[in-house]
Image: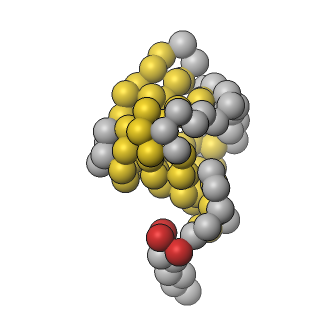
Amino acid sequence: MAETVALDELTGSPHAKLFDEPLVIRLDLAAGERVDPHRHPERTVVLHLLSGEIALDLDDETHDLEPDDVIRFDGRREVSPKAVADSEALLVLSRRVED
């Protein structure tokens, strides 16, 4: 089975779900918009910034992301992305494998 989704056809904001497992989400944030701090404790998260600029808070660290940056982190960390400019990102949340 294969599924195809066109990112530019998704209308959910700030999140639009593409697939269930692994959970794949398109994040669309306007400049200055922030997603409240939260965790995904059962997941490993990969964020690929497609456009814009995001300041990604992970616990007490901030990662400044630019287009084509990809970051992976443990979903047990508290995460809060803030768009410095209008931004679009693709997130993949896979089931976390125990160390």
Question: Residue at 68% of width from left, 31% of height from top?
Answer: 36
Q: Is residue 22 visible?
A: no
> In the depicted view, which residue is nearer to us: 96 or 86?
86
Nearest to the observer: residue 96 or residue 99: 96
Q: Residue at x 61, y 67 (%)?
A: 11
Task: Say which quarter of the image contains residue 76.
Answer: top right
Q: Is residue 20 above or below residue 15?
A: below
Q: Quadrant of the C terminus?
A: top right
Residue 14 is situated, as x and y percent measured from the top left of the image, at 62, 51
Quarter holding residue 3: bottom right
Q: Residue at x 52, y 24 (%)?
A: 57
Would residue 4 be visible to someone looking at this image? yes
Q: Foreground: 89 or 3?
A: 89
- The tally of labels here is 0
Residue projecting furthest to the bottom: 1
State the colouring used for the structure image.
secondary structure
Q: Is residue 60 left or right of residue 72?
A: right
Q: Quadrant of the N terminus?
A: bottom right
Q: Where residue 63 sits in the image (x, y, percent)?
A: 40, 25
Tell me where residue 77 appears, x and y as whole percent.
61, 26
Residue 34 pos. (x, y %): 60, 34
| Image quarter of residue 81 | top right
Judge from the rendering whether residue 91 lies leftward or rightward of residue 16; answer left or right: left
Name, please, the residue furthest toward the top.
60
